[in-house]
Image (spheres, rainbow, N blue to C red):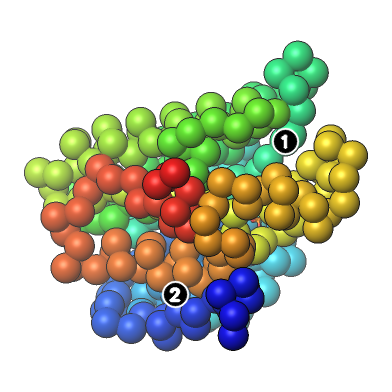
Amino acid sequence: MTSETPRPAPRPAPAGAGVDLTSRTALVTGGGSGIGKACAAALAGAGATVHVVDRDAESARKAAAEIGGEAHVVDLADPVALDTLPTEVDILVNNAGLQHVAPLTEFPPERFDLIQRVMVTAPFLLMRRSLPHMYGQGWGRLINVSSVHGLRASAYKSAYVTAKHALEGLSKVAAIEGAPHGVTSNCVNPGYVRTPLVENQIRDQAAAHGISAGDVLTDVLLTRSPVKRLLEPEEVAAAALWLCADHSSYVTGISLPLDGGWGAG
Ligand code: NAD
């Protein structure tokens, strides 16, 4: 292999390796696809009972069935629908998200509002509902799937960048309030992950820039990442799982970049 040959992604450690979540209950939003599905599988692999929440009924049921979990078909943009979800949750993974790519001057206000409801208000409401149980038992884990875009901005992503920065703030407040109760709250901050969300973005960016999908990957998405490959969902799930372990109880209020060195430049 020459130094120019792209290296394949390393095989992540088996789900659950070194982390015992037997007797823990987790709720993963957007658990039907991509990163959420990988998180649900990793948590179940470590022994947790997992509630898979997604608005897409088929993918929620399929993902839950694969891991012996329970599916909840809920639209997180609807605060009333959240009341149907369980509150006795030890691990909350706020993962569901969506993207919309457009210049600020053309950004549809209703898309902006929807993205804030799904990616900021729903995590807040789910924390608010599950924290009393976590505080009561003196243990809890809030995993907030943020993004490199929680720490820095890109053009055409005003709603997404705004929402992820807000999630970062929410996560830090939860870390400070949760600390006396044994509850940690952390963000994981992936670069570009091989999921349907990114595949859709590649299509949208190709249209916006008038270039091919292949050129979007090399010339737009990965220009700032020294590691020239997409991240795999299982690699994000491995980081989330590590944050759920008892040995991570001193790690709280952080934002963990999984960015292939993007932030180092
Ligand atoms: P994905 O599109 O594969 O999965 C997102 C899931 O969320 C889908 O199953 C979808 O149905 C669900 N969802 C969306 N809106 C919902 C709603 N209103 N109610 C209920 N469920 C809803 O996306 P992904 O790439 O796995 O992204 C997951 C999270 O990771 C998002 O928060 C995203 O911002 C973040 N993230 C992704 C990347 C990436 O490159 N893919 C990078 C950084 C951060």
Task: Work out whether residue 78 can be spotted.
Answer: no
Mark 2 CB near ligand 1 (8 Å cut): no
Disc 2 marks a residue whose amino acid type is Ala
The C terminus sits in image quarter: top left
Which residue is under mark 1? 100
Above or below: residue 164 compared with residue 96:
above
Quick one: 104 or 71, which is closer to the camera?
A: 104
Quick one: 78 or 140, which is closer to the camera?
A: 140
Residue drawn at x 76%, y 28% as measured from the top left: 102
Quick one: 98 or 59, which is closer to the camera?
A: 98
Residue 156 position within the rendered picture, expressed as x and y whole percent measured from the top left: 70, 29
Which residue is under mark 2? 42
Residue drawn at x 48%, y 48% as measured from the top left: 262
> Residue 213 falls in which quadrant of the image?
bottom right
Q: Which mark is residue 223?
A: none
Decide if residue 106 is on the left or right side of residue 262: right
Residues at circles 2 and 1 in contact by the CB criterion of under 8 Å: no
Residue drawn at x 38%, y 64% as measured from the top left: 239
> Residue 179 falls in which quadrant of the image?
top left
Mark 1 neighbour class, 10 Å CA radius: few under 14, some 14 to 19, many 20 or more:
some
Residue 135 position within the rendered picture, expressed as x and y whole percent measured from the top left: 19, 48
> Residue 92 falls in which quadrant of the image?
bottom left
Q: How many marks?
A: 2
Quick one: 109 or 124, which is closer to the camera?
A: 109
